[in-house]
Amino acid sequence: MGKFKYKKTFIALCIAACVIIYFLIALLPYSGALYVSAETRASFAMENFFGQEIIPEQVMLLDNPQESFFHRVNLISNAQEQIFFASYVIHSGVSTDIIVGALLSAADRGVTVKIVTDGFTGNIPATYRNVLSGHENICLYRFNSFNFFRPQYANSSFHDKYMTVDNRYMILGGRNVGDKYFLPSGFTGRQSLDREVLVYNTDLAFSGIIAEVNDLFNETITSSYASSVSPRSSRNSEAERAHFIALYNAYKASLPPRDFDYLSNTVGVYNITLLHDPIGSTKKESVIAYNLMMMTLNSERIIAQSPYLVMTNRTLEIFADTVRGRDFTLLTNSLASTPNLPAFSSYYVNRRNILQTGITIYEFQATNTSIHAKTYLFDGRLTVIGSFNLNERSIRSDTESVLVIDSREFHDLTLDVINGYMARSLRVAADNTYEPNDHVDAIPVSRRRRALYQVAGHLLRGVRFMI
C-alpha cells in the first residue's frame, strides 16, 4: 500500500513538473528586454508622417456603434471585386448574422472574399464557418492556430481589425465583430465602445494606404503562420445560408432608399501612414511602440485612449522618460467599467507608480459599458487609430496595425468625441483617489470587486510581460 501511494505521488509530481515546464516554454520567450532593430530606429523621422498636399484618400471617424455597423454592411454591399476581412475575434449574434449574409451575397455575385481571424481566440463559430468556407468564392484563414507541440507560439495573437473593399474603401480600428460592439436594437448585454477610421479612395488609380493594407493582408494569409480552413459539410448549411441572406436583405430593406455620399461625408488629409508589427508568432520587434514613443518625444501635447495601461517595471521606466516634461493625458476605464480582469488588475495595482510619471489620468465612469478604443493624438494634427493597446501584449507579442493620419480637421473631430468620454470620467489625483467633480459621480464598486482586482493584480505581477 505504501509503495502504491509513493508511486501515485511520484506520477503526480512528474505531471506537475511537465505542466510547469510546458508553461515556462510557452511564456519565457516573450519575457526580457524589448527589441527594436537599428533599421527601425534609423527609419524614424517625424516629418515622414506629414504631407504637403491633400491626397485622394479621405477619412471619416466611426465612433458610433450603429454607424460603424451600417458602413461595414454598406461597403460589403458595394464590393465589386474583392473583400479582405481581418478580425481578432468574431462572436455569434444578430449583427454577425447580417454581416455573414452580406458576405455571402457579395460572394454570390462573384466578389472574392477572404477572411482571417486569430487561430486560438478568434475561431469563427461553427455555423458561420460552415456556410462561409463552403462557398467557392470565400476563403477562411486562421493565424497561429494552437499547436500543443509549439507552446512557444501560444502567447501571440492576431489582433488586427480591418476590412478593405477593392481599392475604394477601408475600415480599420479596434472594433471586433459582435453585438456588444455594434449594439443592435434590443441588445441588453455589456457594451464595448470602440473607434475606427473609414478611408475612402476618390481615385481608383491612386495606390495609397488601402493598397498597403491589402498587401499586409496578403502577406498575413500567405505566411507560414496562417492556415486555410477546410469546408465542413453540414446538413443545415443551405438553410443557414438562406437564413443569413434573408436577415441581410431585411436589414437593407429597413434602410432609407438612398446611397450614402462618402465624398461629402469624409474629410481631406495630407498623409496616411500604416504602422504594423512584423508578422510572426513569437516575441516581436516593437515597431508601433517605438514609433509612438518617438512621436511623443517630438510632441508637446499628447492625448491617449486605451482600455488599460499594463507595463513591466522596465517598460514603465522607458514610458516615464518619454512623457517627462510633456502634457500627456490618458483616458482609460475605471474599476467599475472594465470587463478585463487580468489587464485592468495589473493597471489597478500599478496606478500609483504610473501617476508618478507625471501623466494625467481620467477614468471612464459607467456600469455595463466599457471603452475599448485605442487612439493617440499629437499636437493638434496627428491622429493614430488602430488595434494597439498600451499594454505589453501589443508591445511585444501580438500582431497590431494602426493608421497615422495627418489632418487637423480629423484630429479635432476625434478630440471632440474623446472629450465626450472625458465628460463622463473622473481625474485620478496624485494620491491615487478621484478628484471631486460636480458633474460626474464615481460609480460605487463593491469591496469584493476591489479585493478581487487587488489580489489578481499582485498575483499577476510576475507575468505582466504577457498581459
Image (cartoon, rainbow, N blue to C red):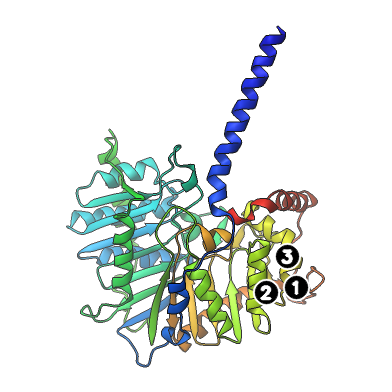
Q: Residues within 10 Å of mark 1 (few under 14, many from 20)?
A: few
Q: Quadrant of the C terminus?
A: bottom right
Q: Which residue is mark 1?
A: 356
The answer to which image quadrant residue 222 occupies is bottom left
- Residue 148 horizontal side relative to residue 243, left or right: right
* Rendering coords of residue 416 (x, y %): 55, 81
On screen, residue 128 above or below 306: above
* Closer to the camera in the image, 299 or 425: 299
Residue 31 visible from this viewpoint: yes
Tell which tag, 1 or 3, sits nearer the viewer. Answer: 1
Dot 2 and dot 1 residues touching (CB under 8 Å): yes
Q: Which residue is mark 2?
A: 320
Q: Residues within 10 Å of mark 2 (few under 14, many from 20)?
A: some
Cα separation, mark 2 vs mark 3, equals 13 Å
Q: Residue at x 63, y 71 (%)?
A: 318
**Which badge, 1 or 3, comes first in the chain's sequence?**
3
**Which badge, 2 or 3, comes first in the chain's sequence?**
2
Cα separation, mark 2 vs mark 1, equals 8 Å
Q: Residue at x 61, y 26 (%)?
A: 14
* Rendering coords of residue 130 (x, y %): 31, 41
Q: Which residue is mark 3?
A: 351
* Rendering coords of residue 112 (x, y %): 22, 58
* Rendering coords of residue 425 (x, y %): 68, 71
What secondary structure is found at the residue carrying circle 1? loop
On screen, residue 462 above or below 12: below
Q: Residue furthest left?
A: 110
